[in-house]
Image (spheres, helix red, strand yellow):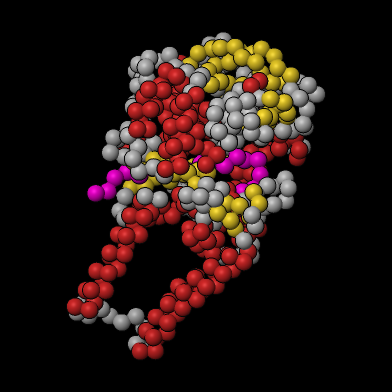
Amino acid sequence: MTSPILTAVAWPYANGPRHIGHVSGFGVPSDVFSRYMRMAGNDVLMVSGTDEHGTAIQVQAEKEGLTPQQTADKYHRVIAEDLQGLGCCYDLYTRTTTINHRETVQELFRALHANGYVAVQREMGAISPSTGRTLPDRYIEGTCPICGYDNARGDQCDNCGNQLDPADLINPKSKINGETPEFVETEHFFLDLPKVAPQLAAWLDSREDWRPNVLKFSHNLLKEIRERAITRDLDWGVPIPLDGWRDAQMKRIYVWFDAVIGYLSAAVEWAKRSGDPDAWRAFWNDPAAKSYYFMGKDNIVFHSQIWPAELLGYNGQGAKGGAPGDLGVLNLPTEVVSSEFLTMEGKKFSSSHGIVIYVRDFLSRYQADALRYFISAAGPETSDSDFTWAEFVRRTNGELVAGWGNLVNRTASMIAKKFGEIPTPGELEDVDRALLDAVEAGFETVGNLIRHH
């Protein structure tokens, strides 16, 4: 049976071009999945866009002498062109600086607040001593107080997976200029994750087909779950839609809260563009619909904890109860499809250290199908994998050209030699039926593998 399928593809930051490590996690796998699901007769909606809020954009803007909006505009075009060149078939590729996205984010915020899952608290915020600017958690690194990992971020430790605050870190340093931040008391809105923890646990317990690494990591996140700040002292982001706050020039909803809402806002925008403003509901309100979220493993926490928590709170399905917002009861993810990391010649991709192959540079020399094939055949699906030029050449020449290419060439040559054209089909014989049955069985085998990622 066919059903509505939402392919929710991770939103790349609009602070620079994407490299092949990025698209090995979110770009190619999601596109292969969507193409198969469409071919199998499902109604597929594949959406994403550029993530354009947050300090990463502001830092890049300063480096280039641009405004944050100019920076977002520049890299939105660059990334969209790269994904188009790679052959990705989005139904809508949009951005988080649209009016539609802002309104959708504010709708979720208001409903979460009304249902009691968002409240004001005070915390210690990090400030850059040299600039006076707020340093959001992801721009502070130090030693994890739990496992001792040296490069833990101010929001979480990638080694042990625990949620952190910048003030928790041992020897915290700014990623921007290396200085030690100052901490001052500030007031922010927090998402009350413990109020949905039992429901999150029950939901995760019901997920049976997820990749084991994703499910294990997600369950581990619940052990240390706590409230998490969803606003920051910034002037670049979505305004807080409450009296007394909406006109505050230096208070904004922070990027990690608003970016995941992009999957919903993009579906709403797609529906408006299609001429049927309610078309998005088939993918979000229909219990029979399924949704698959594609990303790299560093984004698991936002898709298996934060986004489901926002949805549970919006639906009024957490411990504090509540009523669904104006958008109705929204579906939680069917599956979080996370890839591991693609390395390059044994080293982690790093634009700042020159260990990088940008998508557009790759496509200027090689066909998109060669890269798509390599990622599909040797990508980091369940464990880290390594890109080397030698292996890329071997797979391209040995498997694509000598294998598949030789089959196509021989078939076409024999047809041309014997018939001079594609022959008119005649009555099927037993040997023909056997061949068609084998092809159909192969389609089912491959399809099952794609469905289960």
In the figure, is residue 374 to the left or right of 346? Answer: left
Q: Is residue 238 magenta?
A: no
Place of residue 310 in the rendered image (x, y in percent of width and height, measured from the top left): 44, 25
Residue 151 percent coordinates (x, y)? 66, 35
Q: Determine whether, in the image, residue 254 is placed left or right of residue 216.
A: right
- Position of 365 relative to 335 (above/below): below
Figure quadrant of residue 424: bottom left
Residue 352: tell me if it is visible.
yes
| Residue 273 in sight from this viewpoint | no
For the point 24% across and 69% down, the residue is 437
Residue 360, image x, y percentages: 63, 56
When the figure is inspected, residue 374 is found, relative to residue 169, above or below; the finding is below
Residue 390 percent across, percent down from the top left: 62, 66
Q: Please give the name of the residue rendered at 42% of the width and 43% of the height, measured from the top-left corner.
A: 212
Q: Examine the image and state in which quarter residue 397 appears.
A: bottom right
In this rendered view, identify the residue nearer to me: 291 or 240. 291
